[in-house]
Amino acid sequence: MISLIAATLLSMAAMKGDAMDNARKAFNNCMIETHNTAVDGKASPSDFIKTSDTACPTERAAYKEILVKSERSYGSSMADAEKFAAEEIQMIVDSIVTSFNENVESGAKLTPEK
């Protein structure tokens, strides 16, 4: 019985953090779809870099907003929070660009997160 209560409490605690993870997944999955579309279209690496810089504006903005809000809640200045958010977003973009450069010739696609 106690383990059931503990599991329920842990589950509820995990749900609280889901908003940030959901925003990250939404942005990442959108970038994966951008990658897969570009692989299908055999885009050049330079064209994909340009595309990736502006892709998924809604998901990017939502993820940035929640990252900034989270950092501000820990006492970061607005400038530091925005810098952190930009770095986190850029890491996802860089990962997708790297994958594209590896996959464009073979036609390999990425699988969205669940």
Image (cartoon, rainbow, N blue to C red):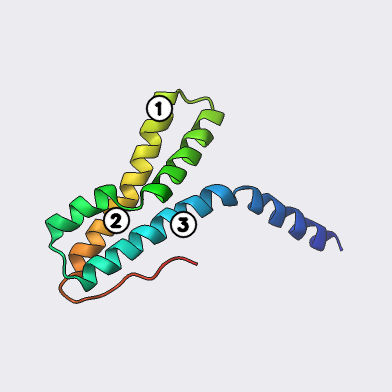
The relative height of residue 36 versus residue 85 in the rendered view (above or below) is below
Of marks 2 and 3, the one in the foreground: 3
Point out the frontmost of discs 1 and 3: 3
Tell me which residue sits at (16%, 70%) in the image. Answer: 42
**Alpha carbon of mark 2 to alpha carbon of mark 1: how far?**
23 Å
Q: Amino acid at mark 1?
A: Asp
- State the quadrant of the N terminus: bottom right
Q: Going by the image, does 70 lie left or right of 92? A: right
Residue 102 image position (x, y, % from top left): 20, 67
The location of residue 12, given as percent across then percent down, is 71, 53
Q: Residue furthest right?
A: 1
- Relative to 93, residue 81 above or below: above
> Disc number at residue 95?
2
For marks 2 and 3, the one nearer the N-term is 3
Type of amino acid under label 2: Ser
Which amino acid type is marked by label 3? Lys
Going from N to C along the chain, the mark reached first, 2 or 1, is: 1
Q: Which mark is residue 25?
A: 3
> Mark 1 — residue?
80
